Amino acid sequence: MESFYTLQGEGFHQGRAAYFIRLGGCDVGCVWCDVKDSWDADKHPKQSVEEIVGKAIASCRLQVASNQKLETGNRLLTVITGGEPLLHSLDELTHQLHEAGFETNIETSGSSPLSGKWDWICLSPKKFKPPLPEILLLANELKVVIYHKQDFDWAEEYASKVSSTCKLYLQPEWDKKESVTPLIIEYIKQNPKWELSLQIHKFINVP
């Protein structure tokens, strides 16, 4: 659907420079999704893996200082998102991104089988189509969007299913941030295993 170089605005990698690759296609259909244009994969032109990775290399090298190489030890973050990116096989895409020196991160609902080789898996489960059991223990980060009070119980349900090393985040749904954020703050104060995730890219006006 689109790709762009920006800052990661939420979750564990918040504030890092990141190249986003947004893939078309989604079968989850969250009512509060802010990229509904991504749902229909046929609305977006098909590109080869080589085209996608080549664009990532060109875009990032143009914007990173000449003495900053895309190499292990100084890898730029790529975030594969959607839509639901796991509707596609991501094995070759992540292989070529690693070969080019990128760090790979996926944002997924976990509702489709896992493919690809990942340095970081951000699992954001949705009630509309729950994650597959096999992805739960592989998640490095659990990010639950809070839309109303009942979502706290739902978040705890999934916190009990991920690994003990998985980072736990509660994130207010953007349109309800004024009413929901204070609830999240109080909840985290009472349950400090959780941390707050804010969509800072929306506050600072970057993609």
Image (cartoon, helix red, strand yellow):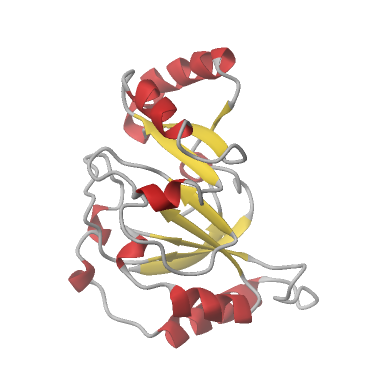
Q: Is residue 31 left or right of residue 160?
A: left
Q: Residue 13, percent across and down?
A: 61, 48
Q: Nearer the viewer, residue 206 or 162?
A: 162
Q: Nearer the viewer, residue 130 or 133?
A: 133
**Residue under the image location 69 percent in, 71 percent down:** 64
**Residue under the image location 42 percent in, 34 percent down:** 158
Residue 204 in view? no
Q: Nearer the viewer, residue 133 or 72?
A: 133
Q: Residue 7, percent across and down?
A: 57, 54
Q: Residue 140, percent across and down?
A: 56, 48
56 up-or-down from 32: above or below: below
Q: Is residue 112 left or right of residue 55?
A: left
Q: Residue 164, percent across and down?
A: 59, 37
Q: Indicate the quadrant where residue 63 lies.
A: bottom right
**Residue under the image location 58 percent in, 79 percent down:** 57
Q: Indicate the quadrant where residue 175 lies.
A: top left
**Residue under the image location 54 percent in, 78 percent down:** 95
Q: How many marks?
A: 0
Q: Residue furthest front?
A: 134
